[in-house]
Every structure is written in C-alpha cells, then in structure tokens.
Amino acid sequence: MASFPLPTLAENDAKASALSEVFFHGEENLAYLVLSTGLGVGVVSDGRLLRGASGAAGEVGHWLGSGEAPCACGRKGCLETELGLGALLQHHRALGGEGEDLETLLAQAQAGHPVARVALAHLGSALGRFLANLAVAYDPARVVVGGKAAELFSFLEAPLRQALADHAFLETHRALSVQPSSYGHLAAAVGGASLFLARFFELGGLWAESPRRNGGRYEEVAFGTRHGLGA
C-alpha cells in the first residue's frame, strides 16, 4: 500500500472489531470474539486495545487445546481446531447431519432439525467454558460475539450462558454480559474507520502526516488536502 495516495493503517480483524465498540460505544473493558474460520479475540482493557509486543495479544485460537488436529498455523492441537466453525460442521456430520456449509446448518436449525440444534448447543457449551477462561485472563465487563457466530447466536446463547455460569471463577463472571455484534460482518470495517477518525478528532480536524513520538510535534496537513480528505 506504499504507493496508495492516502494514509493507510493495517489492523487484525478481531482487534479492529473491538475498536468499533470502543470508539462508538465507549466500552472500557471488552472482549470481542470473532468466530469464523478461526478464533480470535480483540481485548480492550481500561480503554486501551491490547496488542502485545508482537501484536499477538488476543490470538486465543492458538492456545493449545487437548486435541491433535492440525491447525492452519502449522501446529497441532490449537484451540480453534476444536472451537472453530469448521469443527462445528464436522461435529454436525459426525452426528449424522447433512449440510456442506453453515448457511445450510443454520437453515436446518431454524426449521427445527434436532441434529443441527444439538451440534449448535454443543458449540455453545464449549464457548461458555472458553469464556469462563477468557474472563479469568482479561476480566472484561462485556463480551461481543462477532463473525459468523453472531448469525448463530440465538442457538448458542442458552447453552453458552449455562456453561459460563457453571464454570465461572468469579461470581460476577457468572452473569457476564455476552451479546452478538450489532455491526455484523461490517464490524471490522467500522473499527478500521475508527482508527482514522480517532486520530482525526484528537487533532481537532487536522490529520497527522507522521505520528508524534516522544513529545515531538505533529506534522499537520490542514483539512481539505488529499491527506485531510483521506482521513
């Protein structure tokens, strides 16, 4: 993107999705769970997005689980091989269910097919246990479920909440707020926009051509230039 004529920033999808909640809803302690082909979490603590020394903070899908299934990262037994939506489809087929994709599974669940609902309830329980661990690690005030899992949330919610209540470490975690993303598949894009909006508003309508380092002054370009409009 170096030749692109406007300022650009790059961010992980789970972290960008978490930023959408911070910027537009003012949440100071939040975990944004993205469950799709993988499993990732964007964590906000005391109003700050956690990135870590190498940007790997929140890559909980690569916590080691109990299985031996190969992961896309090249290791075996990563948690996302057990909790990812691919694992949901595999479990559904193992129970005798038919359907090649999540849309079919969801349609079957909505039509009342028992096997589809059992598979989703199993995933919901597993996610509840996972959130009990996540709550100990990051102690969020709210968890937002995004990615494809947000579309399945009505079937995941009851078993998820029961498992969370059963396994929570702190009493407050038993009633931890868990809700689907209000932005759906656009959450990462909304969060990406907030990366620029936050910086733009901090400068009172000016764009910082270069970030300020150690108290150095901003190199500002007035709103109305190509950089300002890009912001």
Image (cartoon, rainbow, N blue to C red):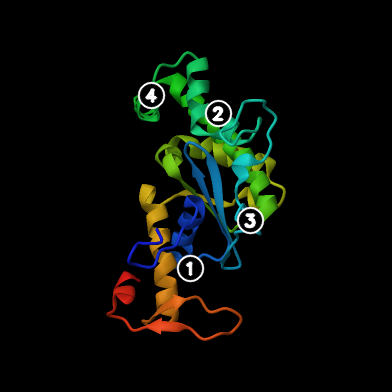
| Distance (Cα) linking label 2 and label 3 | 34 Å
User: Looking at the image, which residue is at 34% across and 25% down?
Assistant: 111
Front one among 106 and 61? 61
Say if mark 4 contacts mark 3, CB within 8 Å: no
CA neighbours of label 2 inside 10 A, class few (<14), some (14 to 19), many (20+) = some
CA neighbours of label 4 inside 10 A, class few (<14), some (14 to 19), many (20+) = few
Say if mark 2 contacts mark 1, CB within 8 Å: no
CA neighbours of label 3 inside 10 A, class few (<14), some (14 to 19), many (20+) = few
User: Looking at the image, which residue is at 41% across and 65% down?
Assistant: 194
Tell me the residue that label 4 is attached to. 112
Tell me the residue that label 1 is attached to. 26
Amino acid type of the residue tagged 3 in the rendering: Ser
Which mark is nearer the camera, 2 or 4?
2
Query: Which disc, if any, is residue 85?
Result: none
User: Looking at the image, which residue is at 51% across and 55% down?
Assistant: 15
Task: Tell me: 171 left or right of 109.
Answer: right
Rendering coords of residue 124 (x, y %): 54, 35
Rendering coords of residue 202 (x, y %): 45, 79
Where residue 7 sits, quadrant-wise, is bottom left
Where residue 197 sits, quadrant-wise, is bottom left
Q: Secondary structure at mark 4?
A: loop
Tell me the residue that label 3 is attached to. 54
Q: Secondary structure at mark 2?
A: helix
Question: Residue pushed farthest right?
Answer: 169
Amino acid type of the residue tagged 4 in the rendering: Gly
Question: Would you place residue 94 above or below residue 110 in this image?
Answer: above
Sequence-earlier tag: 3 or 1 = 1
Query: Which disc, if any, is residue 122?
Result: 2
